[in-house]
Amino acid sequence: TVVDTVDRAPAAATRPAALPRRADGTVTLTGAPPTGLTHRGEQVTLTGRGYFRVRWQVLPGQRPGALVMPTWTGLRGKLFHVASGGGRRLDDVQPGSTDGTTWMGGPATGTTALPGGTQQMWQNEYFWLDGSVTLHQNERGADYNLFAQASRWDQVANDVATPPVAGAGIVRYGLVRDTGGDTAPVPQYLTRARPADPATVRQRSRVTPPPH
């Protein structure tokens, strides 16, 4: 199993690779509040076969500091991290900033820090699921929100192919991570188990092949 790891941002003008086309079915979401996952203990269960998006909102102006990552539990089947988009990694410097402020924070607000070894999130993270999994909001310390919704192959492809437009806050092209097969990466903090405290899921996902 290939697991996400710390990586460098591609050059802003680097176009993404072609996005492999996987089965474009339907993913249903249950259990999430209509406002998204905005508080510790909230969760959403995703079921089906197809693509979905998780959009990040990091809020250092509300509460900076150490971020406790969301986790994935109860995986049945397969889950792959196929692309990153939204026009920016959240550690990109915001257009027009003179003090290095990023979407993770800056001198005026303080900054949000990821756990060591955690892959830097982009504004939009895209996944492909064949089965079911539950995503947990584990907010302690730094404030953040998550917004999950079903997506389609063409929506993912269009997002990552959007060229940089600084005036619109689009700093870079997106990044395709999918290999088209089972060597595509799985997200960190993923398990087939259902621990009593979802925040205890380890960073290095241990996901054995699904039973046949």
Image: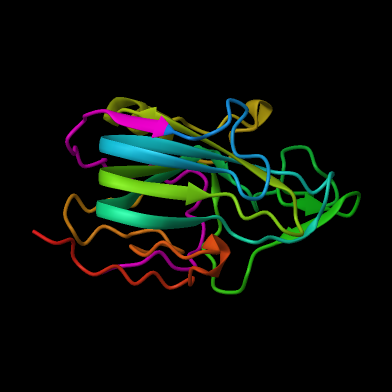
Q: Is residue 67 shown left or right of residue 30? A: right
Magenta segment, which residues?
1-29
Q: Is residue 85 visible?
A: yes
Q: Is residue 28 magenta?
A: yes
**Residue 160, quarter of picture:** top left
Q: Nearer the viewer, residue 148 or 113?
A: 148
Residue 196 drawn above or below residue 138: below
Q: Is residue 176 magenta?
A: no
Q: Residue at x 78, y 37 (%)?
A: 96
Q: Is residue 17 visible?
A: no
Q: Residue at x 91, y 49 (%)?
A: 108
Residue 143 drawn above or below residue 46: below
Q: Is residue 107 shown left or right of residue 21? A: right
Q: Nearer the viewer, residue 180 or 151?
A: 151
Residue 208 drawn above or below residue 41: below
Q: Quadrant of the N terminus?
A: bottom left
Q: Residue at x 66, y 40 (%)?
A: 38
Q: Nearer the viewer, residue 40 or 120?
A: 40
Q: Position of residue 128 (x, y in %)?
A: 29, 43
Q: Quadrant of the C terminus?
A: bottom left
**Residue 57, quarter of picture:** top right
